[in-house]
Image (tube, helix red, strand yellow):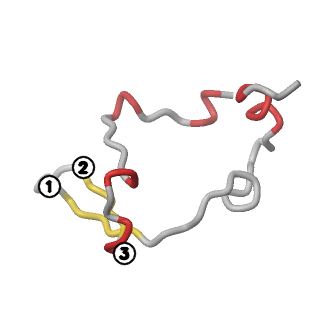
Amino acid sequence: MSSTPRDAWEQVANDPDPIDDLGYEYRPLSVVSVEEGGEKYIFLPREEEHLTDSEFMIADGRSVRDLDDCR
């Protein structure tokens, strides 16, 4: 029987290592302010080969959740 995504999430440590436990790869980002004097920014990959549609996610503040709240 294969595990569900919920089962896999429950097995992750409370403070997982981003690389070893979650498989993330660090990439340098450029931060661009999009509002003068405001708090809105765009985070873009510095390497041009990573500027593809599959590398982006657009979200507003209501879509961003603290992972501690999801446990």
- Which quarter of the rendering shows the C terminus? top right
Q: Which mark is residue 23?
A: none
Helix, strand or loop under label 3: loop
Answer with the quarter of the image where residue 5 lies. Answer: top right
Above or below, 60 relative to 19? above
Residue at image mark 3: 47
**Residue type indicated by callout 3:** Glu
In space, the residues marked 3 and 2 are separated at their CA atoms by 24 Å
Q: Is residue 61 above or below residue 34?
A: above
> Which residue has dot 1 on it?
37
Location of residue 50 in the rendering, given as x and y in whole percent from the top left corner: 38, 66
Q: Secondary structure at mark 1?
A: loop
State the residue position of label 2.
39
The alpha-carbon separation of the residues under discs 3 and 1 comes to 27 Å
Say which quarter of the image contains residue 57: top left
Residue drawn at x 67%, y 56% is: 23
In the rendered image, the residue lying farthest to the left is 36
